[in-house]
Image (tube, rainbow, N blue to C red):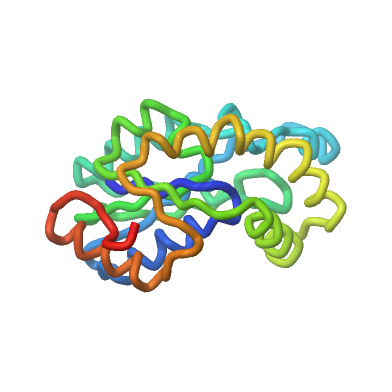
Amino acid sequence: MIGVCGGSGSGKTTLAHRLVDALGPQAATCVSFDSYYRDHSHLTVEQRATVNFDHPDSLDVDLLVDHLQSLKAGTEVAVPVYDFASHTRSGDLEIVHPRRFVLIEGILLFAFAQIRDNLDHLIFRHCPDQVRAARRFKRDVEQRGRTPESVRAQWLETVQPMHEVYVQPFASHADLVTSHSQDLDVVVSEIARALRQGGPLALENS
């Protein structure tokens, strides 16, 4: 069980998926903590817009922990599919099969002791705030149907303040901290090699 954590736009999702590719789909799979946002279909559209999605309370941590334990026991799980445009669970499910390596990526992943306790390796992805903000803006407007104004407001009101409280401080729990400035190909290669060998995670130039 390998956790990959970092701020919004830090590249943690890219790193996790690249690791799955490097390890091979028969040996590795990835679960996103974003899939476990609580369903807000009972709220009006206006009320949903006021929810702090960057606070730990916005996520169903118990369901994720249950799924991690099931995968560890060799049982497949049905992961909810979240609709970020409407802030609701779509009703669809994605079946995730157990693999030798299960990567779990998410912004608030390390803020929960019960998640950390189920991880064998913890990787934190560091990236400058300005770079993260630009990436977040592009993604939310182009992929999640958000307006530029709402993305800017959310960044200032919740994303960055919550990052400073619930994300960045938990980098201290990581076995390995990778940086935006490092060559991603090298980072992926060295982490994948260490995982295959069963040794500690380390980068030669870290």
Quadrant for the C terminus in the image: bottom left
Q: Position of residue 60 (x, y in %)?
A: 51, 32
Q: Position of residue 18 (x, y in %)?
A: 39, 67
Res 173 → quadrant: top left
Q: Position of residue 32 (x, y in %)?
A: 46, 50
On the rendered structure, is 174 left or right of 141? left
Q: Relative to the observer, which residue lies in front, 124 or 55?
A: 124
On the rendered structure, is 167 left or right of 87? left
Q: Residue at x 79, y 34 (%)?
A: 50
Q: Relative to the observer, which residue lies in front, 173 or 20?
A: 173
On the rendered structure, is 67 left or right of 127? left
Res 101 → quadrant: bottom left
On the rendered structure, is 159 left or right of 23? right
Q: Position of residue 74 (x, y in %)?
A: 20, 46
Q: Residue furthest front?
A: 205
Q: Relative to the observer, which residue lies in front, 36 or 129?
A: 129
Q: Residue at x 62, y 31 (%)?
A: 55
Q: Residue at x 64, y 37 (%)?
A: 54
Q: Residue at x 23, y 42 (%)?
A: 72
Q: Is residue 158 above or below residue 197?
A: above
